[in-house]
Image (tube, rainbow, N blue to C red):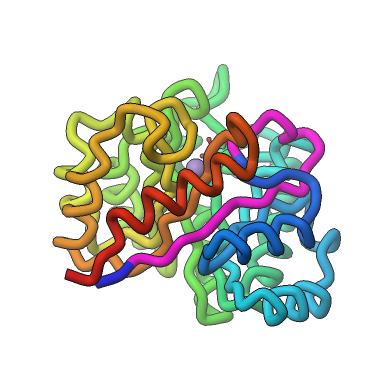
Amino acid sequence: MKFLSAATISLVAEARSGPFVFHGDLRRGCAQAAKLGFDAVEIFPASADVVSVIELRVLLKRHHLKVAAVGTGAGWLKHRWTLTSPDPLIRNKARKFIEQLIDFAAAFNAPAIIGSMQGRVEADVNRRQSEQWLAEGLKALGERAGKRSVSLLYEPLNRYETNLFNRAEDAAAFLVRRKIRHVKLLCDLFHMNIEEKSIPDTLRAVARQLGHVHFADTNRRAIGFGHLDVKSIIETLREIGYAGYLSAEVLPLPTSEAAARQTMRAFRKFNTAD
Ligand code: LER
Ligand code: MN
């Protein structure tokens, strides 16, 4: 079983210091990702209309790249919209923003990601209510993705970013309990390192729902630049039959190119067929 490699490209000015390999230039990001041997790019756009579907198709074809996934977090970073805001107008804006990105991603047969757009249990809102809003949002957005024959990815985040679901097993149980369809889990190794007792045990427990992996080391640098036990994680992913992307959502340190090269070095080391 082989995994697929992806590099992140952010097109959001507000995310300049965020964990993305390439920043600010889609053409250059695609060219560099292709040159270094990545299978795909994961795009983090400011909105669905900043990238032309036709132009991106041409770019991907030229570089033999696929779209691994499309992030929606700009709705939070730029506008402070979330699916769990107590304000119904804001929840609605969040949903519309994500809908457009689901449609954009589906044009490339790729899933959209709900990370920061999930929001949090805000002050003066009870947890049951927040979970209800999250379930309603994920359910409707999942149905939209399903109609377009793609899934939607839900990403548990560490405690400093949300108080909704920090651990993958809790998120997985929530999706089942609420009968949310077409939504898979995105397991980000950086968040998991903070929250999980054991990353391999957790990956085994959520295997059926695993749809995407953010491939980052403990310090959110490229895999190999921190102290993650990568070998045991890769062995587990192989054991559970994961055949999706390992997508580098990492800080561009010491440079974008060095982070991308290190990711590919680690990827090749572990991505053997046997
Ligand atoms: C998004 O993929 C993520 O991991 C969050 O930490 C957003 O910053
Ligand atoms: Mn992530």
Chain part drawn in magenta: 3-19
In the image, is 188 to the left or to the right of 66? left
* Residue 104 vertical placement versus 257 (above, below): below
In the image, is 206 to the left or to the right of 114? left
Q: Nearer the viewer, residue 234 or 207?
A: 234
In the image, is 252 to the left or to the right of 155? right
Q: Nearer the viewer, residue 232 or 184?
A: 232
In the image, is 185 to the left or to the right of 161? left
Residue 159: x and y, percent?
A: 43, 24
Query: Who's the residue at 17% across and 44% down the image?
Result: 232
* Residue 9 vertical placement versus 243 (above, below): above
- Quadrant where the C terminus sits is bottom left
Query: Who's the residue at 60% across and 51% down the image?
Result: 8
User: Which residue, as the protein is rendered here, is positioned at the far top?
Assistant: 123
Q: Quadrant of residue 3?
A: bottom left
Residue 199: x and y, percent?
A: 23, 39
Residue 52: x and y, percent?
A: 83, 71
Residue 154 falls inside the magenta stretch: no
Q: Nearer the viewer, residue 83 or 213?
A: 213
Q: Quadrant of residue 91?
A: top right
Q: Nearer the viewer, residue 140 or 40?
A: 40
* Residue 154 vertical placement versus 180 (above, below): above
